[in-house]
Image: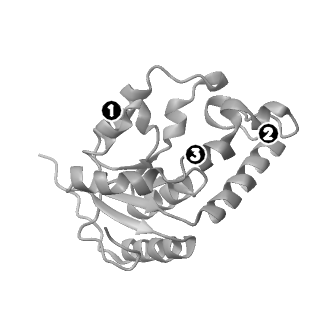
Amino acid sequence: MLSADDPLPLMPSRVLIAGVTGSGKTTLARRLGAAWGLRHVEIDGLFHGPDWTPRPEFLDDVRAFAATDRWVTEWQYTSKGTDEIMTPRAELAIWLDYPFPLARRRLVRRTVSRRLLRTRLWNGNVEPALWTRAAWTGENDILRWQRETRHKWEERMPLIAAQHPHLIIVRLRHPREAERWLRAQEEGASTAPPKRRSRER
């Protein structure tokens, strides 16, 4: 398992980003996709249909993008069957293993902002209004979900590393580490020689 200061042994083409809810997986995926020229597939957008209904095509869509050559996505919905599809194809996993209080503050800010501003998310969905009881109960209690899954990746990563020895894993323990690592990738991409286009035959 690599740290923020370890060089990558190769330039990955397929990347998974793991971390507790609210740690910043999507933001990192977007920036890394831009730096490396990877297609960012926001997996929440594949899962949630109108009115928060799970899309029946979800796993078919995951199979379709996972079969392509260059992508980055959030490592989510593992209980729905995404592990068996994405993990064998991925070359790099980035684990945002941040202190829980920090991830908690980030999630609270994001949740309050989305619900106060009525932000439209995937397929037109909007989270419950901030001032309603439904916003913080049942399936909408995202703070409870974060608390209950806070140790998920700590428990899973050793097993994943053993089962998928091809997978490079980078563990980033704080946003400062993530920023330092990402800037190194962005600078490396900007100074890399342009790829030669193969001639059509």
Q: Residue furthest left?
A: 201
Q: CA distance from mark 2 to mark 1?
A: 32 Å
Q: Position of residue 25 (x, y in %)?
A: 52, 55
Q: Provide the secondary structure element on which disc 2 rests.
A: loop
Q: Position of residue 12 (x, y in %)?
A: 29, 60
Under mark 2, the amino acid is Arg
The residue depicted at 16 percent of the width and 53 percent of the height is 199
Q: CA distance from mark 3 to mark 2?
A: 26 Å
> Given contact means CB atoms under 8 Å apart, are the residues at marks 1 and 3 in contact?
no
Direction from residue 158 to residue 35 in the image, left or right: right
Q: Which mark is residue 118?
A: 2
The residue depicted at 65 percent of the width and 63 percent of the height is 101
Q: Position of residue 39 (x, y in %)?
A: 41, 49
> Residue 18, relative to residue 115: is it above or below?
below
Q: Which residue is mark 1?
A: 63
Upstream in the sequence, badge 1 or badge 3? 1
Classify mark 2: residues with Cα within 10 Å, few (<14), some (14-19) or many (20+): some
Q: CA distance from mark 1 to mark 3?
A: 28 Å
Kindly tell me whether residue 50 is visible in this rendering. yes
Q: Which residue is mark 3?
A: 148
